[in-house]
Amino acid sequence: MLKSGQLVQGPQVEAFEAEVKSLVGVTHCVAVNSGTSALHLGMLACGIGPGDEVIAPSFSFAATANAVELTGASVVFADIRLDDFNIDPGHVESLITPRTKAVLAVHLYGHPARVGELERICERHQILLLEDAAQALGASENGRQVGSGGAFGALSFYATKNISSGEGGMITTNDPAIARRVRLLRNQGQEVKYQNEIIGFNNRLSDIHAAIGREQLKSLRYWNEARQRNARFLTDNLRGPTTPAIREGACHAFHQYTVRVEASLRDSVIKYLRASSIESGVYYPIPIHKLPYFAAKDSLRSARCSLPVTETAAAEVLSLPVHPKLSGRDLRKIVNVINSLEMMKA
Ligand SMILES: Cc1ncc(COP(=O)(O)O)c(C=O)c1O
């Protein structure tokens, strides 16, 4: 690839787009330089901007809400359900106003959000459904891949994701107009060199990154299956924490294996795991509505921003190792260490 001399957006990017297209089952994929760009350009391509509201979960990585605000629209936060940590369709519907342009569902930790229910709500109110599938490539519900419903899906190939291109992202869509608009926006407003039709960005993916992504994509299925096997072992054997549920019909990509522990015990559990050389993580300790930029927004200080389930989740979640390289010994050690914790038995 390096010998070809084609380092910027070129044949590797095109091939990567074609491969993801057939995996997700959509008619168009457009690669960009990050998941954040995929969300940002996707929403711009949908005509989302100043004066609009987009409903999204606060229990996500900040990029979800940042991308909404970068368009000039305002994010409105909906609460989540504690069983799968995903956006609560009932709460979403109660937040819809004449300014609502879209609902941005996140498939958190790799578990599909309730796309079917959200689709029906969005149809009823004539608004768009958008999917932040950054953590969930390969996840599906009743055979439908995440990223294949709604106006567009946004993928991330950041280093920690189930597959990575180093940095990178992609838009998945069945709407040719959205795909074309994103193609323009990612490349200074031009599809044909020097024929700049609109104002755009340089959010291209390089061929170097695409070549890495293509190699990784070959292992996605195998790696996701290993993650699922590891998750099953943990769920079958852990005593104490609340283990993650998988909704009927859902195929969980297990980007994270996230349990809940009592809030007052979480720091001690993390310390104890670390002392046993087991790394754990909290995704995310501060819900987005409590981060300084969002907490300072008048529109988010009102009663419309009461998110009790989100706050419970932020205080209780703990992600344990689930990555495909874990050995049987590693898994048994995680289980033994957690099950031996006296504090978890109280
Ligand atoms: C839910 C979610 N949305 C969006 C992003 C943004 O992706 P990226 O880091 O590729 O910009 C991430 C990942 O980091 C994420 O986890």
Image (cartoon, rainbow, N blue to C red):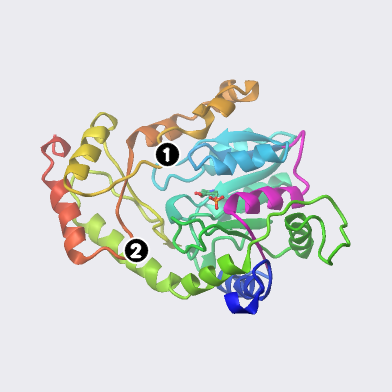
- Locate residue 132 relative to residue 47 in the image: left or right: left
The vertical placement of 207 against 185, above or below, is below
Q: Which residues are magenta?
A: 29-52
| Residue drawn at 52 percent across, 59 percent down | 157
- Locate residue 83 relative to residue 335 in the image: left or right: right
Within the image, what quadrant is residue 170 found in?
A: bottom right
For residue 34: magenta? yes
Residue 284: assigned label = 1
- Locate residue 336 relative to residue 163 in the image: left or right: left
Looking at the picture, tell me which residue is in the foreground, 246 or 71: 71
The vertical placement of 318 against 34, above or below, is above
| Residue drawn at 43 percent across, 44 percent down | 85
Q: Amino acid at mark 2?
A: Arg
Looking at the picture, tell me which residue is in the foreground, 184 or 243: 184
For residue 31: magenta? yes
Q: Is residue 150 visible?
A: no
| Residue drawn at 39 percent across, 73 percent down | 222
